[in-house]
Amino acid sequence: MALRRWTLELGTVAKGFLRAGQGIRFSSAVSSSAPSVANELESTENEIVAPDFTNRNPRNLEQLALARKERGWKTTWPTQEYWHRLRLKRTQHHVVAYVEHCSGRIVVSASTREWAIKKYLHRTTGVAACVNVGRVLAQRCLEAGINFVDFQVLTPWEKNSETVKSFQNAVSEGGVVLKEEQRIYG
């Protein structure tokens, strides 16, 4: 209410200037465009680092390669020593790829079941489907901040298949490294 009253009064004052032929002129409150010295002194106060810092990023130690990797038993296959593992599952009808965290949660996934991927494919299985799923998964991994993943094929005889090799090439060309860093013991 008060703002409307103030704007109405301002409008009537402005009309009075225009009728008198004086016009309205605006001028800058600062005489020059150079910053003042007082502003520079105040900006150094912002650069002081707080003595107590709490990092709330749960993945920080993983990114620094300092986090502990669960090794599991030596007799288990595939090995459990990873932070993020890339999985590729091919069924009769679809191709599914996902990145699994060492806690068991799926962090990022891509599949030919998604309409955004499926509508550009002739078939939802095969080499072209694996390449496209690999590209999309690589992009999503980089957006999520995952740059290194551990990739092991579940069955050893699938390692040399054309679809798995094309999937690996698509993911690595997308910018994701298919080998995790070694843990730094400190």
Image (cartoon, grey):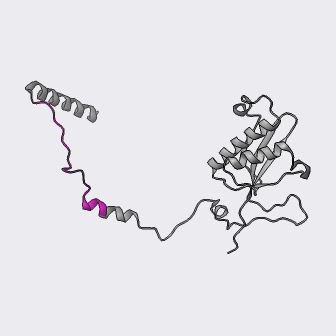
Give 33 or 115, whichever is nearer the viewer: 33
Give the residue at the far top of this rendering: 19
**Residue shown at 91% from the left, 64% from the top:** 75
Q: Is residue 103 above or below residue 13?
A: below
Main SS of the magenta segment? loop
Q: Is 9 left or right of 156, judged from the image as shown?
A: left
Verify whether residue 62 appears in magenta: no
**Residue 76 point in image, percent of width and height:** 89, 61
**Residue 51 point in image, percent of width and height:** 48, 71
**Residue shown at 91% from the left, 50% from the top:** 157
**Residue shown at 15% from the left, 26% from the top:** 15
**Residue 149 point in image, percent of width and height:** 73, 55
User: Count of labels shown?
Assistant: 0
Q: Quadrant of the N terminus?
A: top left
Q: Quadrant of residue 67?
A: bottom right
Give 106 or 96, whichever is nearer the viewer: 96
Give 132 or 149, whichever is nearer the viewer: 132
Verify whether residue 23 appears in magenta: yes
Q: Quadrant of residue 55?
A: bottom right
Q: Is 186 left or right of 123, judged from the image as shown?
A: left
Give the residue at the far bottom of this rendering: 186
Q: Quadrant of the C terminus?
A: bottom right
Which contiguous range is marked in magenta?
A: 22-40
**Residue shown at 30% from the left, 64% from the top:** 41
Q: Is residue 164 above or below residue 41?
A: above
Q: Is 173 left or right of 51, judged from the image as shown?
A: right
